[in-house]
Image (cartoon, rainbow, N blue to C red):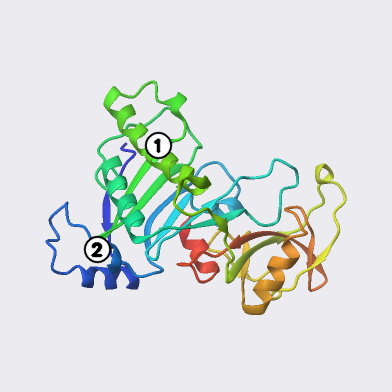
């Protein structure tokens, strides 16, 4: 079993626009590079995220990418997470503004680290841990590389020296981006203010460990919403416009264990700010 796959997938509309802009380049040339100015603003140039792992269905559906870099220079990451329990109702999503040169350098560093071209990175002897997925926008589409248990260095003792070295290059690349988001880039990060929020709903269940929780009236569309994917246990509503602002305001004083009331019932909500390339709950269903 290989832990890495490098594929070229058919691109969605923004990527089609990019491929058109780069049509003069040789598709078979691994060195072909699109001009940074050709990236559509909301196109995902680089996305690094976790897939799978032994976590809840709600977490699988709402997990944020570790890093998402867009054509217009926005780099979105998740900021520091509070250790208090229950945690906040909203994740700490941060955005750093990069210039075109910085975006181009990130693309080059991704390729130098092996994104899209890495060979066999081995299979660590560990189970139920997430796979790190790298998706890089190239001249002919999306190049994807997956690495099992990349964050678990201690599980790599059975791998070859070449495999461990290749994995460390990818880890170092991820660290360089998260360090930049923490203040190493030319611009400081700021809170990301989404224009839409997905609310993944489940029936609320009292939690003695969380203590007594005050109810909060849900200001968005009626809960629980439509089924999310095929899991059957999760439902989801997409909140936009003025209601999205009201949800963000209400969530600022809520937490992960808050009972949200809608239609005379209580609901546990996992709130997921939608990113620039996402439009509704359907994007969460397909990302898992």
Q: Is residue 91 left or right of residue 141?
A: right
Location of residue 112 in the rendering, given as x and y in whole percent from the top left corner: 26, 42
Q: Nearer the viewer, mark 1 or mark 2?
A: 2
Q: Is residue 202 left or right of residue 187?
A: right
Instruction: Tell me the residue at 50%/71% (across/down).
Output: 279
- Within the image, what quadrant is residue 176 found in? top left
Residue 224 visible in this rendered orientation of the protein: yes
Identify the image quadrant of residue 12. Answer: bottom left
Q: Decide if residue 223 is in sight here.
A: no
Q: Classify residue 223 as left or right of residue 216.
A: left
Q: Earlier in the sequence, mark 1 or mark 2?
A: 2
- The residue sitting at 17% across, 57% down in the picture is 32
Q: In whole angstroms, how far apart are the C-alphas of marks 1 and 2?
A: 26 Å
Residue 45 image offset from top left, x and y in percent? 35, 59
Mark number for residue 35? 2
Question: Alpha-carbon neighbours of circle 1 within 10 Å: few (<14), some, or many (≥20)?
Answer: some
The x and y percentages for residue 60 are: 55, 52
Which label sits on residue 134?
A: none
How many dots with numbers? 2
Foreground residue, 25 or 270?
25
Q: Position of residue 277 (x, y in %)?
A: 45, 67
Find residue 171 and name its label.
1
Q: Nearer the viewer, residue 280 or 84?
A: 84
Secondary element under disc 1, as helix, strand or loop, is helix
Q: Residue at x 72, y 62 (%)?
A: 251
Q: Do the residues bearing badges 1 and 2 touch, measured as CB atoms within 8 Å?
A: no
């Amino acid at each position: 079993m290989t832990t890495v796959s490098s594929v070229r997938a058919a691109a969605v509309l923004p990527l089609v626009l990019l491929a058109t802009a780069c049509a003069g380049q040789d598709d078979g040339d691994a060195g072909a590079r699109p001009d940074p100015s050709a990236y559509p603003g909301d196109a995902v140039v680089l996305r690094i995220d976790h897939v799978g792992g032994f976590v809840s269905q709600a977490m699988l559906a709402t997990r944020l990418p570790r890093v998402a870099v867009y054509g217009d220079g926005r780099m979105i990451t998740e900021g520091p997470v509070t250790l208090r329990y229950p945690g906040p109702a909203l994740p700490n999503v941060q955005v750093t503004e990069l210039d075109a040169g910085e975006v181009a350098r990130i693309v080059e560093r991704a390729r130098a680290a092996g994104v899209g071209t890495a060979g066999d990175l081995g299979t660590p002897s560990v189970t139920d841990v997430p796979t790190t997925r790298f998706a890089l926008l190239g001249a002919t589409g999306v190049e994807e590389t997956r690495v099992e248990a990349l964050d678990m260095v201690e599980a790599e003792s059975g791998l070859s020296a070449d495999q461990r070295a290749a994995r460390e290059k990818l880890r170092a690349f991820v660290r360089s981006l998260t360090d930049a988001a923490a203040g190493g880039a030319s611009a400081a990060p700021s809170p990301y203010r989404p224009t839409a929020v997905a609310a993944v709903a489940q029936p609320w269940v009292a939690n003695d460990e969380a203590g007594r929780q005050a109810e909060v009236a849900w200001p968005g569309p009626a809960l629980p919403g439509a089924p999310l994917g095929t899991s059957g246990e999760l439902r989801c509503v997409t909140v936009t416009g003025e209601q999205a602002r009201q949800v963000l305001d209400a969530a600022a004083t809520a937490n992960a264990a808050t009972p949200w009331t809608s239609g005379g019932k209580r609901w546990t909500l996992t709130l997921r700010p939608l990113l620039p390339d996402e439009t509704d709950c359907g994007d969460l269903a397909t990302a898992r």
